Amino acid sequence: MAQLPRLIKSLVSVSIKSQGKNPKNKIGIATTIVQCKQCGLIFSNPQPIPENISDHYGVPPEEYWKADYFKIDGHYFKTEINTLKSLYNFKEGDKALDIGAGLGKCMIALQRAGYDVYGFEPSKPFYERAISKMGIASDKLQNTMIEDANYPNNFFDFITFGAVLEHLYDPSSSIKKAFKWLKPGGIIQIEVPSSDWLIAKILNTCYKVRGLDYVSNLSPMHEPFHLFEFSLKSFQLHSVVNQYEIVFHEYYVAQTFMPKVLDFVLVPIMRLTNKGMQLCVWLQKKE
């Protein structure tokens, strides 16, 4: 997201499926993983580019998520809504936009909280299930990519990128476009994979000790691809030239993918050191 002054590592990651302990034994496509020394952004070079958009976003929801993901309870997105209301003077009917709406669960949660909610989703199967199975109004949800989406300037009070930005080929331009749609003083919430995740560091050290030129970052690569991992510094530097402020941030531990017996030690360490798997930032457009 910031300009890249130089790259501090150039390591190989096997794609398609999890590398596991012995990545050299796996069959897949290899790519180079690089990291910006200035901002901590991690990405692959070259990046995996699908032959057409359906290869990237056309995964059926039933394959991507378990059956219970189609259910929504009263706690879904509740913590985020409470954080939003602490940062922004909420009024009934404030407009919200869900970028990468998926099945529409976040749209439903925001609607229940009193927002006038819009969304768009690039995946045709997810878009169709959101309308047919989740009851999302077809006039509030578009089947489009952010590059083609169009809304009035200064229209929304709140915009969310929930587990979306890491899939976009130009995250910087996507953020800037979303800010055009946002009202002055409005809030954008972004949740992304953290480039400072403790488990990735542990696994990378294990590869290095064994003399393997592999890293765990961005692996496994499957549709839709994870193209980036972000640090807080990525957004701090991006905010300097794009007229917004980071008003809140936090790290989510999420899963460790390690033996359960190690969670007793690893989870508290991640909480204390801000090295959880996910980074959530809250950005405010300057008045």
Image (cartoon, rainbow, N blue to C red):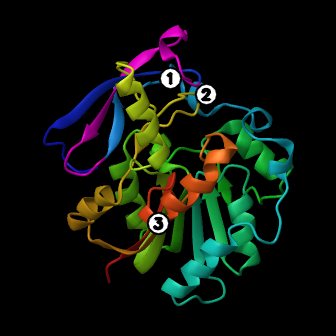
Work out whether residue 229 or residue 212 is closer to the camera in this orientation and state it: 212
Q: Which mark is residue 41?
A: none
Crowd band around label 2 with a 10 angstrom C-alpha radius: few (<14), some (14–19), many (20+): some
Q: Which residues are magenta?
A: 18-40
Between the C-alphas of marks 3 and 2, the distance is: 41 Å
Q: Secondary structure at mark 3?
A: helix
Work out whether residue 79 or residue 24 is closer to the camera in this orientation and state it: 24
Disc 2 marks a residue whose amino acid type is: Ser
Between the C-alphas of marks 1 and 3, the distance is: 39 Å
Q: Are marks 1 and 2 in contact (CB under 8 Å)?
A: yes
Disc 1 marks a residue whose amino acid type is: Pro
> Going from the N terminus, do you reach mark 1 or mark 3 first?
1
In this picture, is 269 found above or below 155?
above
Residue assigned mark 3: 272
Q: Secondary structure at mark 2?
A: helix
Image coords of residue 9 (percent x, y): 25, 32
In this picture, is 97 found above or below 154?
above
Residue assigned mark 1: 50
Disc 3 marks a residue whose amino acid type is: Leu
How many labels sit on residues?
Answer: 3
Q: Quadrant of residue 117?
A: bottom right
Q: Residue at x 20, y 63 (%)?
A: 241
Image coords of residue 154 (percent x, y): 43, 74
Image coords of residue 91 (percent x, y): 60, 90
> Going from the N terminus, do you reach mark 3 or mark 2 first?
2
Depth-wise, is mark 1 or mark 3 nearer the camera? 3
In this picture, is 211 found above or below 138?
above
Q: Which mark is residue 54?
A: 2
Q: Quadrant of residue 125?
A: top right
